Amino acid sequence: MFSTADYLVQAVMVGLAFASVLTWTVFVAKALEVEAAARRQRRLLAIVDTARTLAAAPDDPLVAVARAEITLSAEAGADREGLKERVASRLERLEASTARRLLRGTGVLATIGSTSPFVGLFGTVWGIMNSFIGISRSQTTNLAVVAPGIAEALLATALGLAAAIPAVVIYNHFSRRIAMVRALVGDNAAAVLRLVSRDLGKT
């Protein structure tokens, strides 16, 4: 059906096939990245939540940010509340940047999910239009004349749905997983902030 289709319909089919391959490529890459981030944040939470001081916490971007702000605020005197606010601000920005990094690349899934059905429909309309043109040229209404063209056109719709449905499902899956990872980062940030407060209480 592909080889006998109109050139424009063939281009639509190739584009939809490429979109489907891209969807599954993003799925594999993002699944590995998100799962690695989740495991790292769980391990960090298990350690930071039981640490007694910030010095005992492992080297991690969250801990490093808190230590850096404490060093930079060494000349601020005994402004403990101000220090905690500055550390909290830095931790919040790091949490947001982590979420942005994990979301990078998932926008293409939303684009594929929303546009693929319409691209496939365009290929279908074009193919059916060519079939009707074939009817007028052959001066016959025999189904055998137009059936192949209609079948090719409907194949474009099927490919559009085959590209769109997985893209939408995968995008929603990653939205939930990334929200979970961001919650873990927030838990770790809160644990680091507790260590900072605990250290300040000892001085």
Image (cartoon, rainbow, N blue to C red):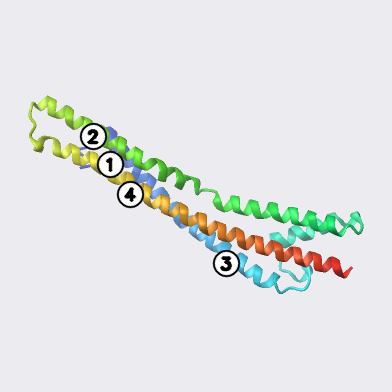
Real-space CA distance between mark 1 and mark 2, rounded to the nearest whole angstrom: 9 Å
Relative placement, left or right, of 3 versus 23 is: left
Q: Nearer the viewer, mark 3 or mark 4?
A: 4
- The residue sitting at 67% across, 64% down in the picture is 188
Placement of 28 over or under 144, stated as above or below: below
Instruction: Tell me residue 99's x, y (percent).
Output: 60, 53
The amino acid marked with disc number 3 is Arg
Q: Which residue is mark 1?
A: 156
- Asked if marks 1 and 4 touch (Cβ < 8 Å), the reply is no
Q: In terms of image quadrants, where is residue 50?
A: bottom right
- The residue sitting at 19% across, 41% down in the picture is 151
Which of marks 4 and 1 precedes in the sequence?
A: 1
Real-space CA distance between mark 3 and mark 4, rounded to the nearest whole angstrom: 32 Å
Instruction: Tell me residue 52's x, y (percent).
Output: 77, 73
- Asked if marks 1 and 2 touch (Cβ < 8 Å), the reply is yes
Which of marks 3 and 2 precedes in the sequence?
A: 3
Q: In terms of image quadrants, where is residue 65?
A: bottom right
- Asked if marks 4 and 2 touch (Cβ < 8 Å), the reply is no
Q: Which residue is mark 3?
A: 39
Q: Which residue is mark 4?
A: 162
The 10 Å Cα crowd at callout 3, few under 14, some 14 to 19, many 20 or more, is: few
Q: Which residue is mark 2?
A: 127
The amino acid marked with disc number 1 is Ala
In the orientation shown, which residue stands out farthest toward the front?
A: 81
Q: Secondary structure at mark 1?
A: helix
